[in-house]
Amino acid sequence: MSVEWQDRTIGDLCDAGVLELQTGPFGTQLHAYDYVANGVPVVPTEAIRNRQINHSVLPKITLSKVEELAQHRLKPGDILFARRGVQATGHIGCVREAESGFICGTGAIRLRVRAHDGNISPDFLSHVLANPATVEWFKFHAIGATMPNLNEGIIRSFSFKIPPLPEQSAIAHILGTLDDKIEMNRRMNETLEAMARALFKSWFIDFVPVRAKTEGRDPGLPKHVADLFPDSFEDSELGEIPKGWEVGAFGDFLYQRVERCAASLETAARPYVPIDCISPKSLFLSESKSGEEAQSSLTKFYKGDILFGAMRPYFHKVCIAPFDGTTRTTAFVLYPRRAHDFAFATLQLHHPDTIDFATRHSTGSTIPYAVWTDLLDTMPVVAPPQDVRVAFNHLVRPILVRIPEPYFENRTLAGLRDTLLPKLISGELRVKDAERILEIA
């Protein structure tokens, strides 16, 4: 390693004016009643993970409230620490242009590279802090067993090696290239999900083809598909629905799989997906754990099954399984009764009405759970005729089955990144050697 590499703590760099730490607003400054439907996003603990800011779980506040919290506004290049919670503590998120002006949440600590300094690359620093060994260091040093917490003092004590700025930039570029490929897959999945949800909403929530025919307009569908829709509505217990359609129960379309793992060897051989591995409001499963980390009371699932959070506040966690694996009883394992109902059932499960129903009917004071049999499976839903569901499945199933596919590529990319990262930031592996490894990969 070059003698130009220097050992520094974050505290050293803060004292030198290179870095700046600031804890998010106190709870007395930001209350639950400050959140509104539309406004400026606030970044909470649960949105911070794997150098990313998850936009699907961001509460919002008014512009007037933002003015009160102006010192907590975020800038591109800021790094946010999740400072509390068993799962979140120690993870970091990078603020990009897309998050400029957002507000740091009460459960986060902001680290900022001061603009006038040119010796530290925010991208390089973010990779150092996202290193799994670094995350574990922060978890180990967090205060409190039940609810671990980070504070500025702990963060200041973290030590790392600083190479010259050109080498920092080169290291960040190599690791960023891998992250960019992972991010591109994620965004592609977001687009696919948006397309599928939009068509579901059009056909089965807003009844757009039926309304178009009622008003004498072209539904904008191929004739053989448009002919499947009626040209009028009728009343039902769920309100106005297309004529000839029925109100059914959700269980008419989905089974629950309750197949327990009988032996520890079988458990260890299957990937394990606890509820915290399922992303909020996304059908894409981005991570899993080794079966050796699994605990008791495990349910098997199979590739193509749908996992759905079974406890509050996780009813918004839904994903399509990309492999055979296991999960705990904190997630339902569901699959369609008929192959042609896959698309309809999956997107109905992912719809806010289903999440709201599960939330309202969950029971238990400490950890509110829902049950499938005789509760969620009885949820009333608009039941389109079979030929409409078949047509929908023909259009949408090819979109949905593509969503789990990047899982394995992303795992490979993340594994390569996590292998290179500690070697690069420690100086054990030089940039040119890493570039050759990437060429081979």
Image (cartoon, rainbow, N blue to C red):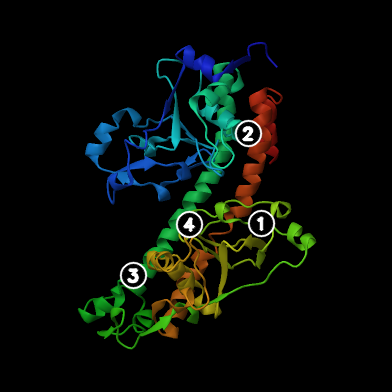
CA distance separating discs 3 and 4? 19 Å
Determine which residue is flagged by label 4.
282
In terms of depth relative to the viewer, which is nearer, 169 or 323?
Answer: 323
Residue 202 badge: 3
Q: For residue 307, what is the image quadrant?
A: bottom right
Q: Residue 40: image x %, image y %?
A: 30, 42
Is residue 119 in view from this perspective?
Answer: no
- Residue occupying the point 30% across, 71% down: 206
Which mark sits nearer the N-terminus, 3 or 2? 2
CA distance separating discs 2 and 4? 30 Å
Q: Residue 170: image x %, image y %?
A: 58, 25
Q: Residue 81: image x %, image y %?
A: 49, 34
Q: Which of the image's four quarters has the C terminus?
A: top right
Question: In this rendering, which labeled residue sits more in front, label 3 or label 1?
Answer: 1
Q: Amino acid at mark 1?
A: Tyr
Residue 272 badge: 1
Determine which residue is flagged by label 2.
140
In terms of depth relative to the viewer, which is nearer, 270 or 143?
Answer: 143
